[in-house]
Image (tube, rainbow, N blue to C red):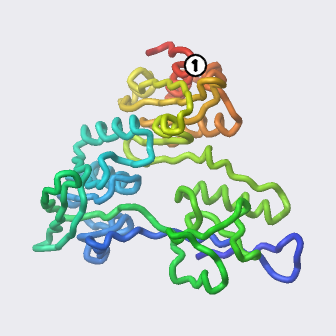
């Protein structure tokens, strides 16, 4: 854990500590990780493999599992992803998730969705993974050279004696803080993976700045509706704000616009035309509510959406903003055009 003492503006009697506690891999009891053995590994162990496995099984169809699986597939492994749910990257816009799975399949990745992991055994240098179909209850076995366990991460707050000093945690082990990141102990603040919210470095960075600003007497604030998330695969997936699924569930009326990279000249020129840009805006005000990109440089392109949402931009605002040609960002402009009216080039 990292502790940063900050003098409190109203007191000289004691320092105030802002703890940025890291997270750790969530274990899967039926499949114990042994990074040293290089057969059943977590994301850390997967980075330390000394050779490309002929076959790799990835347990977990979330962000980290797909990132690591995508890397090893491109290096030559035959990758199979096992996921308990009937879809990939839960929480992501379902249209984006389906398109992403299609692209990954085209790259040679295999998927076993709606599949429960029952146990694992290493025999004769191979990992034998026992699985079961969630709906049918039928058993199966997957044999591979390496099994990557990647079902998520959890706060690293256990065994630190937090309860001994009066710091409260929730049922998931996250430190409970108020809107200014202050814990139940008046002189201790917490940010990052240790508290509620997505476990993202840039989210923790914004919280750190806001926390210190509050300590210094300023109005520190983080807009959690404008925190981007990026999946660093090939192509990349980037999102910010509401998904279409969330808007439907909330009953929010919205407009939606899509523009495919197959109609973008820069994407076609560099032979990376898979994917699209999707914009969601309020049906009444046209204010952008969400943006979802799957395609080349999606992690860079999402910044325009974040900036627009931070300042309350409408889809028409961005659609009427000049974008250089030929660039990938033109796809973002055209998606905004499709949201409030119609695109020019598709």
| In the rendered image, the vertical position of residue 32 relative to residue 276, given as above or below | below
Q: Quadrant of the N terminus?
A: bottom right
Q: Provide residue 246's location: percent of width, then percent of height.
A: 50, 40
Q: Which residue is mark 1?
A: 340
Q: Is residue 11 left or right of residue 249?
A: right
Residues 197 and 42: in front is: 197
- Determine the residue positioned at 34% across, 38% down: 98
Residues 129 and 167: in front is: 167
Q: Provide residue 292's location: percent of width, then percent of height.
A: 49, 36
Residues 243 and 125: in front is: 243
Task: Count neighbours of disc 1 (C-alpha within 10 A) and say few if under 14, some if 14 to 19, many if 20 or more.
Answer: many
Q: Provide residue 200's location: percent of width, then percent of height.
A: 54, 57
Q: Is residue 115 left or right of residue 68?
A: left
Q: Secondary structure at mark 1?
A: helix
Q: Quadrant of the C terminus?
A: top left
Q: Residue furthest front?
A: 251
Q: Provide residue 266's location: percent of width, then percent of height.
A: 45, 26
Residues 168 and 258: in front is: 168
Q: Residue furthest left?
A: 124
Q: Is residue 8 left or right of residue 122?
A: right
| In the rendered image, the vertical position of residue 328 relative to residue 153, given as above or below | above
In which quadrant of the rendered view does residue 321 lie? top right
- Determine the residue positioned at 49% across, 34% down: 248
- Determine the residue positioned at 54% across, 30% down: 280
- Determine the residue positioned at 21% across, 69% down: 119
Tally of numbered tags: 1
In which quadrant of the rendered view does residue 125 lie? bottom left
């Amino acid at each position: 854990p990292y502790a940063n003492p900050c003098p409190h503006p109203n007191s000289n009697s004691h320092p105030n500590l802002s703890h940025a506690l890291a997270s750790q891999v969530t274990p899967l009891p039926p499949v114990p990780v042994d990074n040293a053995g290089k057969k059943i590994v977590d994301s850390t162990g997967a980075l330390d493999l000394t050779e490309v496995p002929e076959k790799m099984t990835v347990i977990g169809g979330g962000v980290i599992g797909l990132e690591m699986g995508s890397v090893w597939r491109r290096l030559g492994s035959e990758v199979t992803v096992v996921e308990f749910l009937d879809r990939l990257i839960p929480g992501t816009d379902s249209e984006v998730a389906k398109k992403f799975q299609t692209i990954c399949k085209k790259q040679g990745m295999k998927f076993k969705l709606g599949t429960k992991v029952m146990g694992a055994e290493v025999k004769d240098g191979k990992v034998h993974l026992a699985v079961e179909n969630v709906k049918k209850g039928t058993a199966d076995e997957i044999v591979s050279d390496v099994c990557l366990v990647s079902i998520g991460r959890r706060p690293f707050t256990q065994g630190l004696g937090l309860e001994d000093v009066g710091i409260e945690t929730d049922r998931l082990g996250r430190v409970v803080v108020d809107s200014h990141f202050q814990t139940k102990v008046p002189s201790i603040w917490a940010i990052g993976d240790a508290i509620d919210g997505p476990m993202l470095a840039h989210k923790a960075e914004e919280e750190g700045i806001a926390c210190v600003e509050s300590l210094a007497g300023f109005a520190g604030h983080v807009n959690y509706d404008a925190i981007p998330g990026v999946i660093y695969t090939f192509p990349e997936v980037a999102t910010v704000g509401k998904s279409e699924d969330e808007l439907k569930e909330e009953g929010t009326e919205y407009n939606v616009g899509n523009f495919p990279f197959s109609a973008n000249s820069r994407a076609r020129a560099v032979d990376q035309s898979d994917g699209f840009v999707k914009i969601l805006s309020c049906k009444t005000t046209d204010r952008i509510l969400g943006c979802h990109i799957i395609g080349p440089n999606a992690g860079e392109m999402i910044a325009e959406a974040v900036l627009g949402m931070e300042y309350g931009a409408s889809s028409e605002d961005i659609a009427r903003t000049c974008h250089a040609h030929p660039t990938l960002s033109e796809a973002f402009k055209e998606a905004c055009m499709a949201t409030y009216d119609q695109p020019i080039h598709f």
